[in-house]
Image (cartoon, grey):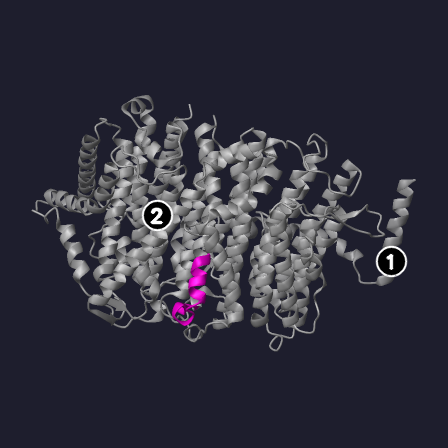
Amino acid sequence: MTDIIIHCAVALLFPPLLLGVIGKTKAAFAGRVGAPYFQPYYDLIKLFRKGSVFSETTSWVFRAGPVVTLSATLIAGLLIPLGHHDAPISFSGDLILFAYLFGLSRFFTTIAALDTGSSFEGMGAAREVTFSCLAEPTLFFTLITLARISKSLTLSDILTHPTPMIWLASGASMLLLAGALFITLLAENSRIPFDDPNTHLELTMIHEVMVLDHSGPAFGIILYGAALKLFVLGAVFVNVALPFATGNALLDWAIFIAAMLSLAMTIGIVESVMARLRMTRIPQLLVGATILSAFALMLVLR
Amino acid sequence: MAFSGVPGLALHHPARGQRIAAFFVVIASFLGEYAVITLLNGSTGAVYQIDWPLPFGPALLSVDQLSIIFLLPLFLVAGCVSVYSVAYWPARKHSSAGKLTLFLGIFAAAMVIVVMARNSVLFIMAWEVMALSAYFLLTAEQQSAEVQRVGTVYLIATHTGTMALLAMFSLLRGTIGTFEFPLSHSLSPSVPVASVIIITALIGFGGKAGLMPLHFWMPGAHANAPSHVSAMMSGVMLKMGVYGILRTLSFFDALPVWVGWLILLLGAWSAINGIALAAGQRDLKRLLACSSIENVGIIFIGIGLALVGMQLQAPYLVVCGLFGAFIHIINHGLFKSLLFLGSGVLIHAVGTREIDRMGGLARRMPITSPLFLVGSLAICGLPPLNGFVGELFLYVGAITDGIVAPLPLAALVAPVLALVGGLAVITFVKLYGIIFLGVPRSVEAAHGHEATPAMTVPMVLLAAGCLVAGLAPVLLVRLVTPAVALYGDLAAPVIAKVTSLVPIVPLTIANILLVSLFLVIGTAYLLRLRRLPRSRGATWGCGYLEPTARMQYTGTSFSEMAINVLGAIVAPNRRKPRLAAAFPPAGTRFQYTVTETVLDRILTPIFEVVGLAFSYLRRVQHGQLHIYVLYIFATLCVLMFWRN
């Protein structure tokens, strides 16, 4: 019971901090002081108090988009185990629902973008659906491989199963999986090298351009939902990449939080040392990640 | 009692009025649905025998669990379509309405007989009636050259299929010595002609189902038929091909494993190619037809998984494959009919099938728009709608294979389905977003109007079916369990063991949680909005002050990026002008068309070569009746001499 409460509290309150850490890391690399760690929280509070501007072309779809996206991401957050504790909702076959919830949120984000009738937002929507479509098989190859290693169809078992022993036994496969998952994490969350959340030109954006017309509380919901998505997919990565469990519940939570914070720092470092890819290169990298994960599956077949 | 719906369907076709006809079809559908539900609850179906003087053995009609899977959506869609047709194709506007109503009834009744027939000759007769009435239905607008062309292509395709079926049933007759269908699992696949029977069945039935590479007639035929006919053809008639293959395969005991793999591969090929083609289409109904190819592919993936599982003694593959295929058959009947009926409303309102000329219709069509959204979400297989349920079974089967099989080839189905699902999202975001959202792209779209209740009520019914089946998947599972047990020859505990891996009850809980979370957050958001200042303005144009509707992203531009990645399947054809100066001269045009690799690069050249060869045969076709009679006489003489 305590674990469920901690799970919900961490999943609800922690995500924006990841954005703060990424921002601070990037600032440190650029030699700036940077915004405070809690800046994303201040932004959210401010947005929830602001008025909204609605485009005259929009309909109810535009208002429903962010709400559906957040609901689907929240359910996905309840399906994954955090810090080697079982997820609050966990059943056989939940990994498929997990993947499809992101499909649902993508559908609504993109139709909300098309609702504005702006060509820039159409552009972003087209990019989003195309790149996610290419990232989808990677996720399933990864899940099949992990399912094969852990002999289970439940996310909680699959993701709490990796141990140092498994890493030693099939290290190559796990390394490939972690690599493929990290690429998927960056692509799905629109981070560099796939998309630059801080770019100044609408023509080159993916996620940010789709939400250009959202304002006030709706934009707050979108920012929060994006942070939550980063948190959820990041937790999947951390579960695979960090196979240590102490057995002490509180200590495990502390390790998990520390791991998530260092993941955020890693993302910040990646963003600081890399330039974003040309748009035509992105599909190649995504297909490359799919092939990596297919290799991982092949390696565990022995 | 069980079949009281059938004569009602078969008998009605008074040309006196559409309303009477629609009334009869609705009554017949209700009776049929009632009969189906009675049968599902365990009462045994009667066997009917038609006394006919033909020398082909007794003409038996009966219903088993497999037939029920097909009858259920058939009656539902037939009822909805007949009500819809009264408003969509009114007799006072279309002189062809009488003909259409007549053939719609015959078409539906013929399909009922196809599913019930237990005699090869009766089956072929019903099959031909179905195929030909579909031809008359789809050529309703016979003045148009385009309609005539696709009608001819359809005729050629369907008769090529019938030819294969005649060969197949003759071989079957030669093997078992009677025209009656053999009992299931009664034939041994080691009979020398068994492989030929299976291959001809795949050609004959696969062509009707739209399996690649025999799908070429589908996009044109479905696009040019009246929308309610497309709904029947796509939602129900394609499944008759699926039914034929399932029935034929059920005759054999322990099929060789290559059959399963072949069907699985054909299914996967159809699914990926079909949805890739759909993503590139600009014509609303052509897009929906291409997506039918994808859905039939998914059904065949399920059948293939089941067959492979039977051979490899893997009950989880058999159960998951059959559940996935059967549930998807019912689901596709619901959401594809819904989308085709919706496309009819759109054509009525805007007068074009071109997606890029629509836009902003959500405001003008407050009922059709959410219904179309439900259909789009369902066809993408997204929770909480019904499309997800069928795919869930396939995924569970594939991933279980990934866990336990020594060489998990069937597990590759999961990434394939994921890719197909991703492409489906591209296709249907484009379809819904470009048609209903944004600003109208043409004058007609700006004046679009909502349809009459006679058209929207059937759609509401179908959409409600999608929602209920999605929120309570246990209903679907109960519907198809008897068929799975019968077809897979499985005991109840085996099925229960596998279905316990599939989250049927937890899915309901998760779905309800999702919907209630949406309602809670949505209400909170709306309440918050009410307390804060709101203003309206133009869409942010990045500083550009005079945006026009023509600057919006179109369907073509939306899918262009994906099409480039999928160039191998849907080779885009660009005709670029040569640019000499900084500004192109007036009258310069850029043309972008999407071609289809299988049809345009492989099949068409083959047909051209065959056509050259056949031009010699044309000499015997001169249109003189007495010479034709002579042909018949000569053939009979030859046959008699051969016999003696």
Viewer-side label of 1, 2: 2
Would residue B494 be found to the left or right of residue B584 on screen?
right
**Where in the figure is residue B635, as x and y percent of width and height?**
86, 50
- Classify mark 2: residues with Cα within 10 Å, few (<14), some (14-19) or many (20+): some
The residue beneath circle 2 is A102
- Classify mark 1: residues with Cα within 10 Å, few (<14), some (14-19) or many (20+): few
Q: Could you tell me which quadrant the C terminus of chain B lies in?
A: top right
Q: Which mark is residue B629?
A: 1
Start and end of the magenta stretch?
Answer: B358-375
Amino acid identity at mark 2: Phe
**Vertical comparison of B245 with B238: above or below:** above
Q: Chain of mark 1?
A: B
Q: Quadrant of residue B371?
A: bottom left
How many numbered discs? 2
- B225 or B395: which is nearer to us? B395
Q: Chain of mark 2?
A: A
- B238 or A81: which is nearer to us? A81
Amino acid identity at mark 1: Val
The question of residue B368 being in magenta is answered with yes
Q: Marks 1 and 2, how far apart in space?
A: 67 Å
Q: Quadrant of residue B642?
A: top right
The overriding secondary structure of the stretch rendered in magenta is helix
Query: At 72% across and 35% down in the image, what residue appears?
Result: B193
**Vertical comparison of B632 with B80: above or below:** above
